[in-house]
Image (cartoon, rainbow, N blue to C red):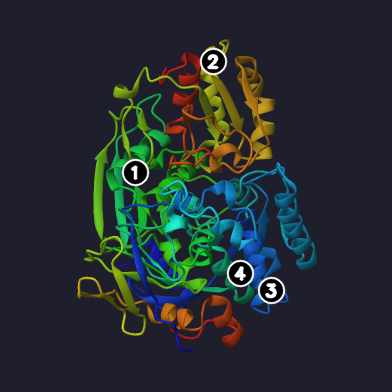
Amino acid sequence: MLMNNPAGKAHVYGDNIDTDRIIPGKYTKTLDAQSLAAHVLEDLDPDFRQKLTLGDILVAGDNFGCGSSREQAPVALQTAGVSLVIARYFARIFFRNAINIGLPVMEIPDHDIANDDRLEADLQQGTVRNLTTGKTYQAAALPPIMFRILQEGGLVNYLKKYGSYQSL
Amino acid sequence: MLTTAEKILSQKAGKTVRAGELVVVSVDGVMATDTTAPSALKAFAKMGGQTVWNPDRCALVIDHAAPAPNERIANLHQLMRDFAQAQGIRLFEIGEGICHQVMVEQQYVRPNEVFIGADSHTPTYGALNTFACGVGSTDLAAVMLTGKTWLKVPPTIHIRCTGQLPPHVSAKDLVLFLTGKVGISGATYQAIEFEGEAFAQMSLAARMCVANMAAEMGAKTCFVHPKGLSLPYEFEALYPDEGATYAATYEFEVSDLKPQIAAPESPDNVGDITPHLGQPVQYGFIGTCGNGRLEDLQAAAAVLAGKRLASGTRLVIAPASRAVFLAAMNDGTAQTLIEAGASFITPGCGPCVGSHEGVPADGETVISSANRNFKGRMGNPRAHIYLASPATVAASVLHGYIANS
């Protein structure tokens, strides 16, 4: 499957953004993704939803998505219109959850992306171009199985297609 | 020369695997809660799932918002009940307890297994020296469908604690201390092995308290070495090879450890309690997969016996399971706590995750035996949460300010 390459404006936040800040536990008990999106990041930045344009890119520092295993966190971001999350590195459950639901994530340990920079990612190459500064960043390569899952648009599609995990 | 993680995953993969390798492994058991199961069941259906791979090793637990506070959550619970009935899998009803407590108590997880739980505190089963790993809903659905998951074999951090903890310094104080040292992301993508005299003397409950907070260090899984572990059934005590390769090693002598506290808004914001003594608190909470067990309630009761909570404070207690609650009733612990002014609520996660009962008010300071104090954690981003041992929580609501006796 051909993956759409994310492109959009950067919204930059700091380190250790936990899943309670991404989507507070009080909102997580639902199957309605829109109701999750309505509250995404509200305790971190109450204006986030207003600032966000469909396809924009969330950029963070270290350890993005630490805390709970709630898959509602990447679902909330994806449903709100975030097309890609870039961090210096991610907490592992968030990282898996994002790929499993088809939300691209890229680990770029040395990025210096600033708020409102225009970004363009190439998921196949694992690169991000900063159109504002002209810089290009190389992301850490995804494990091959995660790349395959992302290519299929998530783990549901992957397993619908293959029935089980293919050999690694 | 293999670590515990490498040993267990090698057994499950049918070949020797080492840190950094990707493996597809057979999974022994899975569990999901009312936060994660509804999405998992939806994903399972979308994957084309008809029947789960092994109904005897799948469990669903209604613990995060139990009993249901509103119709939306009631309907999610019903979805879980219907699925469990249709698939012939065990559903733990409201009041049976917190997923991690009932999995261990009812022997849904045993030593030396690979267990996948749709809850981030699944590494709590490291108390049993099992490879237990938290995942999200779709990953969980995939295991329910295939009986397998893929994992990267983690490198391991080795934490040795020598010496005996002083009296009135508990496993919670120790694991808070370690969380402060390792940091909230210090063990990300890695396993932790806890080893040494301080752990060898611990009860199963205390080991669970330690393993529970491996998640707060970012760990994928953890193992408390089984030396001194006593279980109500026979098991093989598995140890890492001598000379196994560790990514990092910590060593602490803990016989002089002071009571610890994590200040808002991160569980690794830890230090000795001393500078916080006297800080006013309005609300104490004892419970959770961290510290809701009988010995935790007994520690609180020892502080509060024959006394009354300070005016202007309240104490909420959620036993970790029905079995814990019954034991606390049978030995008088519950009565002691209630006479002191505590409110008991349904065994389960209680106010920890802010889904239902026990939400703090704006500007209030909470002292809790839970494992997370992120902003908004208990349902109100304008409350401040400190984490401490059950004895410290009890002493603090007794006085109306942070205290440790």
Residue B53 visible in the shown view: no
Query: Which secondary structure, mark 1?
Result: helix
Please state which of residues B243 and B343 is positioned toward the viewer in this rendering. Answer: B343
Chain ID for label 1? B
Q: Is residue B366 visible?
A: yes
Q: Residue furthest bottom?
A: A1
Q: Quadrant of residue B222?
A: bottom left
Of helix, strand and loop, which one carries label 3?
helix
- Which is nearer the N-term, disc 1 or disc 2? 1
Q: Which residue is mark 3?
A: B45
Query: Do marks 2 and 3 share a subunit?
Result: yes
Kind of residue sitting beneath label 4 = Ala
N-term-proximal mark, 3 vs 1: 3
**Residue B141: numbered disc:** 4
What separation in Å lies between label 3 and label 1 (alpha carbons)? 39 Å
Indicate whether B192 appears above or below A108: above
